[in-house]
C-alpha cells in the first residue's frame, strides 16, 4: 500500500489558537469521527498541533485542509486523490469528463466509464456499513452520484445543486436523472426504510434537483421553438406528495420543444377535471409513487372533451393497479419522453 506523504510538522499550541476536538470537527463537516481518524491514519490529513498529555485537536489550518478534502470528495475524487489535493493546498481536483453511452440500468446500479471501485474504509465507502450509518449505500455508483451523496449527508444544499448542475451540463438531463439522481434517492430511501431517518436529506436533494431541472427547462423553453401541438398536462395523483419525476419529465419535454403544463403534487380530482377542461391538453400524465395513491377511479373521472386527449399513468404506484384499456403506462423517463414525442409527432435525435 502506498504510504501517504509526511503530515505537516507539529505546531506549537498557543492560547490564542482556537482548537477543536475530533467530535466538534466531525459535527462541523457532517461526517463520522471515525472517518476523521481514518483520514489522519491513512492519508496524513490530521491535526498538526498537539500538546503532550492531551488529546490531539484541530486548528484553523487543519480545518481548512479537511474542507478542501471534503470538497474534493464531493466532486467525485477518491479519498487518496482528495488527500493529495488537501496536502498541496489545491481547491478541488480536476476530474476527466468522459462521454458515456446511454444505458438503461436500475436506480441502484450504474455502469459506465466513470464507475469506480468503492472506497474501502468505514464511513467513507458509500456502500459500506448499514444504511443508517454515516454513508449512503451507493454500490457501483459513479463519481457524480457519490459526490452528491456525500454533499447530501453533509446537508450542503449549495454543493448538491452545483454537482447536479455540473452533471446535467456534462451528461444531459436523462443521464443525470437515471444514473446520478436516482441512485442517490434510492440510497436515501433505503436509509429511511432501515432507520426511519433521513427525510430531511431527501427533501434537500429533491429541492436541489427541482431547482436545477426547472432552470434547465425554463432555459430550454426560451431557446427551443415549441412544436405546434396542444400541451401535455403533468399532475400528481390526489394524495401523492412525490412529484420530482414529473419535474424531470417536464424539463426533458421542454428540451424537445413539447409544451407542457405542470400542476404539481396532490392535485384533487375536481381540480384535475377543471384543468383538463380549461387547458384542452393533448395528453394527461398522472403520476403516482405510492400504490395507495394510484386510484384507477381518477383517470376514469376525466371528462370527455373535443378534441380528445390521451391518458397515461406514470410511476411505480400504478404497477399493480388495473387500468382501463384506454389508459397507457409510462415506465421510465426515456419511455415517457419517447412515447409522448412519438404520439405528438415530435422526433428526437440524441
Image (tube, rainbow, N blue to C red):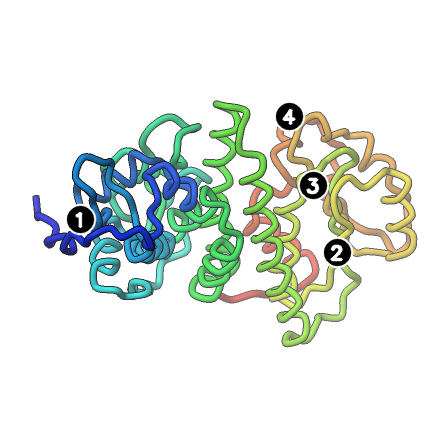
Q: CA distance from mark 1 to mark 3?
A: 50 Å
Instruction: Pick the quarter of the image with the N terminus.
Output: top left
Q: Depth-wise, is mark 2 or mark 3 nearer the camera? A: 3
Vertical side of 167 occupied by 134: above or below: above
Question: Image quadrant of residue 35?
Answer: top left
Residue identified by numbered label 4: 320
How many marks the image carries: the answer is 4
- Mark 1 or 3 closer to N-term? 1
Residue identified by numbered label 3: 287
Q: CA distance from mark 1 to mark 4?
A: 54 Å
Residue identified by numbered label 1: 44
Labelled pair 2, 3 in contact (Cβ < 8 Å): no
Q: CA distance from mark 2 to mark 1?
A: 56 Å
Q: Is residue 216 left or right of residue 142?
A: right
- Mark 4 or 3 closer to N-term? 3
Q: Is residue 220 left or right of residue 173?
A: right
Q: Secondary structure at mark 4?
A: loop
Labelled pair 4, 3 in contact (Cβ < 8 Å): no
Q: Is residue 113 visible?
A: no
Q: CA distance from mark 4 to mark 2?
A: 25 Å
Q: CA distance from mark 2 to mark 3?
A: 13 Å
Which x, y percent locates residue 178? 48, 48
Amino acid at each position: 500500500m502506498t504510504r501517504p506523504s509526511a503530515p505537516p510538522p507539529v505546531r506549537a499550541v498557543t492560547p490564542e489558537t482556537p482548537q477543536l476536538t475530533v467530535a466538534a470537527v466531525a459535527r462541523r463537516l457532517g461526517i463520522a469521527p471515525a472517518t476523521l481518524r481514518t483520514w489522519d491514519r491513512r492519508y496524513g490529513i490530521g491535526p498538526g498541533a498537539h500538546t503532550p498529555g492531551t488529546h490531539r485537536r484541530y486548528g484553523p489550518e487543519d480545518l481548512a485542509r479537511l474542507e478542501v478534502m471534503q470538497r474534493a470528495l464531493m466532486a467525485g475524487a477518491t479519498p487518496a486523490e482528495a488527500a493529495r489535493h488537501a496536502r498541496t493546498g489545491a481547491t478541488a481536483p480536476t476530474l476527466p469528463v468522459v462521454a458515456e453511452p446511454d444505458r438503461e440500468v436500475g436506480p441502484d446500479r450504474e455502469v459506465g466509464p466513470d464507475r469506480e471501485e468503492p472506497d474501502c474504509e468505514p464511513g467513507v465507502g458509500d456502500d459500506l456499513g448499514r444504511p443508517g450509518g454515516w454513508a449512503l449505500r451507493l454500490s457501483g455508483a459513479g463519481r457524480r452520484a457519490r459526490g452528491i451523496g456525500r454533499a447530501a449527508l453533509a446537508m450542503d444544499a449549495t454543493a448538491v445543486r452545483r454537482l447536479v448542475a455540473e452533471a446535467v451540463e456534462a451528461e444531459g438531463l436523462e443521464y443525470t436523472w437515471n444514473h446520478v439522481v436516482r441512485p442517490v434517492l434510492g440510497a436515501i430511501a433505503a436509509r429511511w426504510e432501515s432507520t426511519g431517518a433521513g427525510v430531511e436529506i431527501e427533501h434537500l436533494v429533491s429541492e436541489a434537483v427541482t431547482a436545477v431541472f426547472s432552470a434547465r427547462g425554463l432555459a430550454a423553453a426560451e431557446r427551443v421553438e415549441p412544436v405546434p401541438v396542444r400541451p401535455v398536462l403533468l399532475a400528481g395523483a390526489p394524495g401523492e406528495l412525490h412529484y420530482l419525476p414529473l419535474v424531470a419529465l417536464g424539463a426533458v419535454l421542454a428540451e424537445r420543444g413539447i409544451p407542457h403544463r405542470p400542476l404539481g403534487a396532490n392535485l384533487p380530482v375536481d381540480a384535475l377535471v377543471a384543468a383538463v377542461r380549461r387547458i384542452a391538453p393533448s395528453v394527461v400524465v398522472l403520476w403516482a409513487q405510492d400504490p395507495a395513491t394510484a386510484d384507477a377511479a381518477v383517470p376514469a373521472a376525466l371528462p370527455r372533451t373535443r378534441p380528445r386527449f390521451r391518458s397515461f399513468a406514470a410511476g411505480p404506484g400504478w404497477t399493480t393497479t388495473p387500468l382501463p384499456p384506454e389508459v397507457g403506462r409510462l415506465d421510465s423517463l426515456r419511455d415517457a419522453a419517447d412515447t409522448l414525442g412519438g404520439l405528438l409527432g415530435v422526433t428526437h435525435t440524441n
